Image (spheres, grey):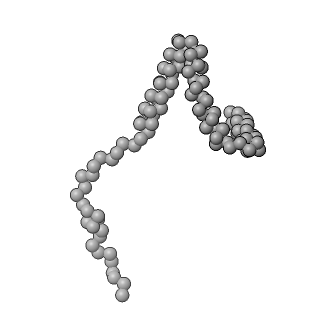
Amino acid sequence: MLFLLRVVLVVGVLSYLALVRNGADPGAEAQRLARAVPAAAPAALAAVPPDTRERLVKDVLARGLMAELSRRAAEPEPPPPSGDTLMDTDRDPAWRGIERR
């Protein structure tokens, strides 16, 4: 897995450097590619068989639901309201010992 991450990092850096070397703006290229992906998505989705598409959608929804439930379970519950009637000044001791002269 670490090998694959290194490969992806190296390919990404080389691609970025190639864009910079050719004088292209990497941000503009990324935006251009991002606009092209949604246009190709319906065609790719139509190529998937319907039963596979349904199973895929169910799996994605199940993972999303499990992630949300896990996130909610990890959140700490808010503490109950305190029944303490003391104020902060009540907690300070009245006598602190011998005063320095």
Can residue 42 be spotted in the picture?
yes
Which residue sits at x=59%, y=32%? 35
Relative to 1, 35 lies left or right: left
Which residue sits at x=33%, y=47%? 79
Q: 91 and 9: which one is in front?
A: 9
> Which corner quadrant holds the N terminus?
top right
> Which corner quadrant holds the C terminus?
bottom left
Can residue 13 be spotted in the picture?
no
* Count of numbered tags: 0
Q: 15 and 68: which one is in front?
A: 15
Which residue sits at x=22%, y=58%? 85
- Residue reaching furthest bottom? 101
Relative to 84, 42 lies left or right: right
Point out residue 59 in the picture as x, y percentages from the top left corner: 51, 21
In this rendering, the answer to whether 66 lies above or below 46 is below
Point out residue 26 in the picture as x, y percentages from the top left corner: 67, 42
Point out residue 84 in the picture as x, y percentages from the top left corner: 25, 55
Q: 44 and 83: which one is in front?
A: 44
In this rendering, the answer to whether 31 lies above or below 60 is below
Which residue sits at x=57%, y=24%? 41
Q: 98 and 51: which one is in front?
A: 51
Point out residue 53 in the picture as x, y percentages from the top left corner: 53, 16
